[in-house]
Image (cartoon, grey):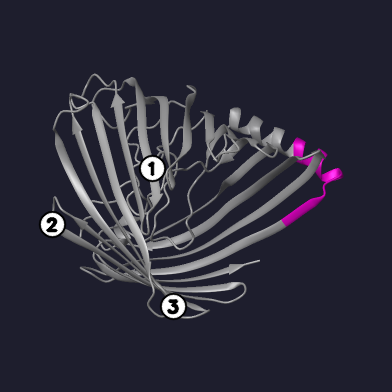
Amino acid sequence: MIPFSIKRAIVVFFFLICSVIYISAQSLDWRGQVSSWLTVNPDPKLEGQIGLRYIPTISIQKSIGDNLLLDGEVAGNFYGMANHYSKMDDQMNGKVKLYRLWLRFSGNQFELRAGLQKINFGSATLLRALMWFDRIDPRDPLQLTDGIYGLLGRYYFLNNANIWLWGLYSNDETKGWEVFPSIKTKPEFGGRIQVPLWTGEIGITGHHRIAYSKGILNNDESFSENRLALDGKWDVGVGLWFEGAINHSDLDSISQRYNRMLNLGMDYTFDIENGLHVLAEYLKVDVSSEPFKWGESVSFSALSLNYPLGLLDNLNSIFYYDWSNESMYRFLSWQRTYDQWSFYVMGFWNPSEFQIYQNQQDQNLFAGKGFQFMVVFNH
């Protein structure tokens, strides 16, 4: 929720600006998404969840000069759900919170966006080493993720190179792969440079923040974390990409201060009837006491198969394999889409304890075997 803080100031400022824009706005758009779902996990004991979510979104824009545009978006996330767990009492909960709240000033080759927004980058899809600021689950048909408060600037060169700079503030919950939350009164900052290379592009990204170990380790301490990443993607008949990232945490209470991630991926669409899209990725994660010293590691492989049955129906399957624990994760979904309605039937067959995407919420419902039915209406 939003306490009396910088977040409340952002909200007030946003609505003041929107009021000014609204008086002479050239475009005002209101849309929304309603979704309802039922998840059932009968293995080993019956567990389940039923929920309802509404995401209303208002977008506004106005031209303010030659090739200059001022636009903004505000969206809410209103949801309620009932959970049944085999080892605890049934639970009901809900929340009303902001989902997006940003203003953007842009021109032909630049944009400056401030507020509660989504920031993501990189080429990987299933096992993302560069999942720094979002938590998009590739199995989620809605691709929902909470935003972060910050200021993002991007400049696009005529040769398709681009540069990103950002500053984040007042984000006190973990993001991406983070284990420790940031101190919300300490600003975070970073940037990214992406340039064309051969038939694709290559990018380098860095980020700095101050985090806090309260409630996670025995000793409560603040510490600095620095991240550096290199990624690239090319089309050579098949799509090829990689993401490599290294994080250094200056945390006194642990000896393994370096965390490394390496993703390798490829995809190709086979000319079979309507086209079979195949995507495969590999991710290795290891921690050590030195930047390039061997340490403890885990690794995963992932495979996605996507096949459109026709104009209305689509089949998708995702498989993960945990090489360290020798366990397989299986996910299969069928989607039917009309003009405003979408229907999903999803099945899963996973280990009883999740070792992948441990940073996602409600993963216990997707442990074991079960299914999920979802209905989505967009207006």
> Mark 1 highlights which residue?
232
Specify the quadrant that holds the N terminus. Answer: top right
Q: Is residue 365 left or right of residue 33?
A: left
Gap in Å between the C-alphas at discs 2 and 3? 34 Å
Badge 1 marks a residue whose secondary structure is strand
Q: Residues within 10 Å of mark 1 (few under 14, many from 20)?
A: many
Q: Residue at x 15, y 53 (%)?
A: 323
Badge 3 marks a residue whose secondary structure is loop
Q: Is residue 21 magenta?
A: yes
Q: Are marks 1 and 3 in contact (CB under 8 Å)?
A: no
Q: Position of residue 241 (x, y in %)?
A: 35, 48
> Mark 2 highlights which residue?
326
Give the residue at the far right of this rendering: 24
Name which residue type carries label 1: Gly
Name which residue type carries label 3: Asn
Q: Is residue 339 above or below residue 65?
A: below
Q: Earlier in the sequence, mark 1 or mark 3?
A: 1
